């Protein structure tokens, strides 16, 4: 038991996004699975920002990522905004570390300097394309190019001082690269299929492939849980670990989140076209899940089920439950289609059991639609009446209109249906109740007594009342509506209906 506990305490996972734009919900799900795996195994969840590509870095994206994780409740144990023993946690601040390790790799004979210009390589690629051949810079042709393997040591040293260069991995041909993925099993790649990939660019910054291997090793990452799109790079990363004689972490590549209709990965364009968010928080002109009225814990619940199954019929889980039941063995291989209606339904379930006071305190921006001059009791009463109709908090703005505005028109289909039952006479009776200050709670009994002589269908009576108060047949309990509206407004709406 002791050794097992010790092993679990050693688990370290990282979420390593690039601040090149807003965090997509696919990235948020990757962060979630890392977080749950760490919590399930008593480990640490690390945030590392992979910002080596400074040309693509977007202003505000880094803070957006941090804010999104905080809103979602996925708080890192280590990262750029807190102390940690393995920092810095921005790759742009780790350049000296990469310089040290690339020199080590070159000294080991596992990497080399290359002085070929972009124009030269583009010309060669174009010639290969004309001949319908694929071009790889590797063991078969590297000696033909301008690099430290084709130059003398003296000439290489001169070129390093005067010519821009990159550093490439020296891939050994004839090897079988075998790597285990925790979701898909073993993957085998022939080393000839892998280029001598660039590890350090001509601006001195490392590529993602080199930096992420060095960082994962130095930060003692035990499990790399990332998106399926990185699966083609797995063999390359394994080769870099082997070049250093380092033990690699365990790998798990998560299935894609697919668009609701058709094939392919869910994109921002899909959300814009179909009317749902794809970012946790607002970004530029795009509303996020927060702005649409999702509770963060509901979104987390939905994302957990988007590619993972607990093995039961249960679908509603709070975070502490997810931390206990999450098993990486139950992550599916195939992509998961995004279903906005399912996400709304889960949010609806969370709104059902979340206390009204907590909603008012945590999400005041959505409660602003209830007038400030209303008493706290009335605001609470309206929310409780509408709670069962809310799928998003933003729905409160629309649903609460029946308490804010008298009907401007009445559903003509309903009007045609009930007019043979003399709705004017029915509403006239309710007007008498209101004028005589009969308690709303007595209206049902009183109208039933009155109807003993009239013999009208009780459904037509209630439809007439609802049409007068609301303008259609939707909404919560009629007598609850009357109580909240108060006698004066209720009477005004009844008389307005008669005049109509």
Image (cartoon, helix red, strand yellow):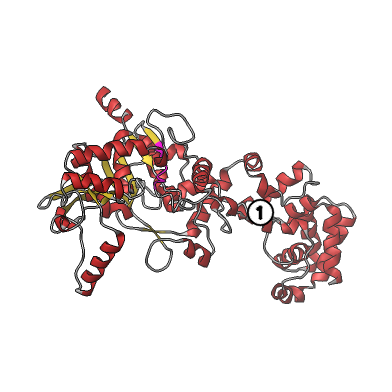
Q: Is residue 186 left or right of residue 202?
A: left
The quadrant in which residue 465 appears is bottom right
In the rendered image, the quadrant that contains the N terminus is top left
Which residue reaches farthest right?
436
In the rendered image, the quadrant that contains the C terminus is bottom right
Q: Is residue 74 visible?
A: yes
Give the number of callouts. 1
Q: Residues within 10 Å of mark 1 (few under 14, many from 20)?
A: many
Q: Main secondary structure of the magenta part?
A: loop
Residue occupying the point 48% across, 61% down: 268
Q: SS class of the residue under badge 1?
A: helix
Q: Is residue 37 visible?
A: no
Percent x, y of residue 216: 31, 38
Dot 1 corresponds to which residue? 396
User: Relative to the observer, which residue lies in front, 347 or 62?
Assistant: 62
Residue occupying the point 76% across, 75% down: 419
Percent x, y of residue 105: 22, 40
Residue occupying the point 26% across, 67% down: 123
Would you place residue 220 above or below residue 483 in this image?
Answer: above
User: Relative to the observer, which residue lies in front, 271 or 454?
Assistant: 271
Region of the chain picked out in magenta, as a range: 46-52
Percent x, y of residue 484: 77, 50
Percent x, y of residue 222: 29, 36
The quadrant in which residue 257 appears is bottom left
User: Relative to the observer, which residue lies in front, 318 or 70?
Assistant: 70
User: Relative to the observer, which residue lies in front, 107 or 219?
Assistant: 107
Residue 8 is a magenta residue: no
């Amino acid at each position: 038991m002791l050794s097992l506990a010790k092993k679990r305490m050693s688990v370290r996972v990282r979420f390593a996004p690039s601040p090149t734009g807003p965090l997509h919900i696919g990235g948020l799900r990757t962060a979630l699975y890392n977080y749950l795996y760490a919590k399930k195994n008593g480990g640490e969840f690390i945030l590392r920002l992979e910002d080596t590509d400074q040309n693509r870095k977007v202003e505000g994206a880094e803070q957006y990522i941090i804010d999104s994780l905080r809103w979602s409740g996925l708080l890192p144990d280590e990262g750029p905004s807190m102390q940690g023993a393995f920092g810095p946690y921005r790759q742009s601040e780790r350049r000296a570390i990469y310089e040290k390790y690339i020199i080590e790799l070159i000294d080991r004979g596992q990497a080399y300097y290359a002085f070929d210009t972009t124009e030269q390589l583009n010309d060669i690629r174009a010639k290969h394309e004309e001949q319908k051949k694929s071009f790889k810079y590797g063991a078969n042709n590297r000696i033909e190019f301008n690099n430290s393997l084709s130059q003398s040591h003296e000439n290489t040293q001169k070129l390093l001082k005067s010519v821009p260069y990159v550093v490439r991995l020296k891939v050994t041909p004839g090897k079988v690269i075998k790597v285990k993925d925790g979701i898909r099993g073993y993957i085998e790649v022939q080393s000839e299929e892998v280029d001598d990939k660039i590890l350090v660019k001509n601006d001195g910054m490392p590529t993602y492939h080199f930096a992420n291997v060095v960082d994962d090793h130095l930060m003692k990452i035990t499990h790399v849980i990332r998106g399926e799109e990185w699966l083609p790079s797995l063999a390359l990363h394994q080769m870099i670990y082997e070049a250093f004689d380092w033990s690699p972490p365990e790998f798990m590549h998560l299935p894609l989140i697919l668009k609701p209709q058709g094939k392919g990965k869910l994109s921002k364009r899909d959300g814009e076209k179909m009317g749902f968010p794809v970012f946790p928080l607002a970004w530029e002109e795009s509303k996020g899940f927060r702005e649409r009225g999702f509770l963060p814990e509901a979104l987390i619940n939905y994302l957990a089920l988007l590619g993972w199954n607990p093995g039961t019929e249960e679908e509603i889980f709070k975070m502490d439950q997810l931390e206990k039941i999450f098993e990486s063995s139950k992550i599916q291989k195939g992509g998961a289609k995004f279903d906005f209606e399912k996400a709304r339904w889960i949010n609806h379930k969370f709104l059902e059991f979340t206390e009204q006071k907590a909603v008012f305190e945590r999400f005041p921006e959505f409660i602003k639609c209830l007038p400030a001059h209303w008493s706290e009791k009335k605001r609470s009463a309206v929310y409780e009446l509408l709670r069962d109709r809310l799928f998003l908090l933003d729905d409160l703005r629309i649903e609460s209109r029946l308490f804010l505005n008298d009907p401007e028109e009445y559903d003509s289909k309903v009007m045609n249906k009930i007019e043979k039952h003399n709705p004017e006479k029915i509403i006239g009776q309710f007007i008498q109740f209101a004028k005589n200050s009969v308690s709303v709670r007595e209206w049902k009994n009183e109208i039933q007594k009155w109807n003993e002589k009239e013999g009208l269908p009780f459904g037509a009576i209630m439809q007439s009342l609802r049409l007068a108060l609301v303008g259609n047949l939707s909404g919560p309990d009629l007598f609850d509506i009357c109580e909240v509206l108060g006698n004066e407004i209720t009477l005004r709406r009844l008389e307005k209906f008669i005049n109509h």
